[in-house]
Image: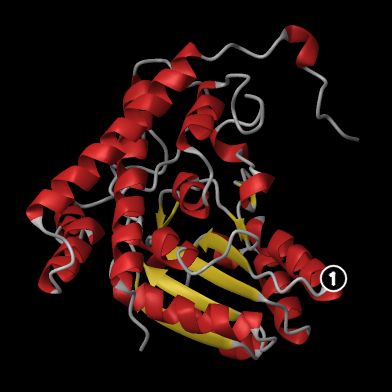
Amino acid sequence: MREPTREQGLAIYRMMQLIRRFEERVAECFAGGEIPGFIHLSVGQEAPPAAVCALLGPDDLVGATHRGHGQCLAKGAPPDRMMAELFGRATGTCRGKGGSMHLCDMAHGVLGTNGVVGASLPIAVGTALASRVRGSGQVTAAFFGDGAANTGAAHEALNLASVWELPVVFVCENNLYAEFTPQSVHTKAGSIAQRAGAYGMRGVRVDGNDVPAVFAAAAEAVELARGGRGPTLIEAMTYRFRGHHEGDPMAYRQKAELEEWRAKDPLPRFRGWLGERGWLTDAERARLEAEVQAEVNAATEFARQSPWPAPEAALEGVYA
């Protein structure tokens, strides 16, 4: 079982802090009317994107979900340009035209967040096939949720990736709810990872709030994919602490369930793991968290001070 090194562990913890603080600020700005449209947050699900993307290189690719701020940040998208995109400003990663559900940053290997549930899987199969044809050695990680796992496109993508032994790591962030519907209502089988056997690929289910567990599963999957030994389906069991979208009153969830998962919050769990090894002192933690908060503050001000897209730019970047 491969564990993060000290350097990797501290980088993962910093990324988890950045994702959490970034999304908490997004919630504040959305509530204040500064961010238009819909916002889907992943607070509580920071471990899978931070641990998986820590194993990817700059040229590797990531397909994200509509709950994809964390995945984009973990792959290296700049927080200031991401925040500007959410604000709809011209300095955003998509010039303010994409918003939260259509973030894209090809300079950092972010294929895009997707408003279409399950769209990340077939896109990842396409980029993985391109990598194979070009011989580039790139790996694509496709993130998706438990609801997306039931779409037809997901089954087609998983099957084709296995048949062609493509360099893909499929990461199902199973947060137990497909929008407002609990998994027990929409899926008869208990595990999504067990479907991997039907496609003839490796499948593994891990505690998605346990960073070392996610890291170990992803390390093996990335190594196999990069070595030409085909895809892996990782099911990371996790939980979102907020609603399906901002404004969702979460009437479909029990208070006890929420409290149970808050006790499994991945940030303090991983902080404890780092502390046990003597890799993160209280002083180092305070410094790191202050740096992250300053970065989020700067990103917010960058977005607020950025210009709106010019009206004449409405048709730029439009392809048909």
Q: Position of residue 3 (x, y in %)?
A: 33, 80
Q: Nearer the viewer, residue 91 or 153?
A: 91
Drawn side of residue 71 relative to residue 129, left or right: left
Residue 100 percent location from the top left of the image: 54, 35
Q: Quadrant of the N terminus?
A: bottom left
Q: Quadrant location of the C terminus?
A: top right
- Image coordinates for residue 255, horizontal then vertical, percent: 16, 50
Q: Residue at x 12, y 69 (%)?
A: 278
Q: In the picture shown, does residue 287 fall above or below 247?
A: below
| Figure check: 102 above or below 138 | above
Q: So how many labels did they put on this image?
A: 1
Type of residue at label 1? Arg
Please say whether residue 192 is visible from this viewpoint: no
Relative depth, front residue between 21 and 43: 21
In the image, is 277 to the left or to the right of 55? left
Residue at (45% x, 49% y) in the render: 179
Residue that sits furthest to the left in the current view: 282
Q: Single out the residue that lies furthest toward the top.
A: 311
Residue holding disc 1: 134
Q: Residues within 10 Å of mark 1 (few under 14, many from 20)?
A: few
Residue depicted at x 70% and y 83%: 162
**Nearest the camera: 232 or 270?**
270
Which residue is situated farthest in the right direction here?
A: 320
Q: Position of residue 2 (x, y in %)?
A: 37, 84
Q: Is any atom of residue 199 visible in this view?
A: yes
Circle 1 SS class: helix
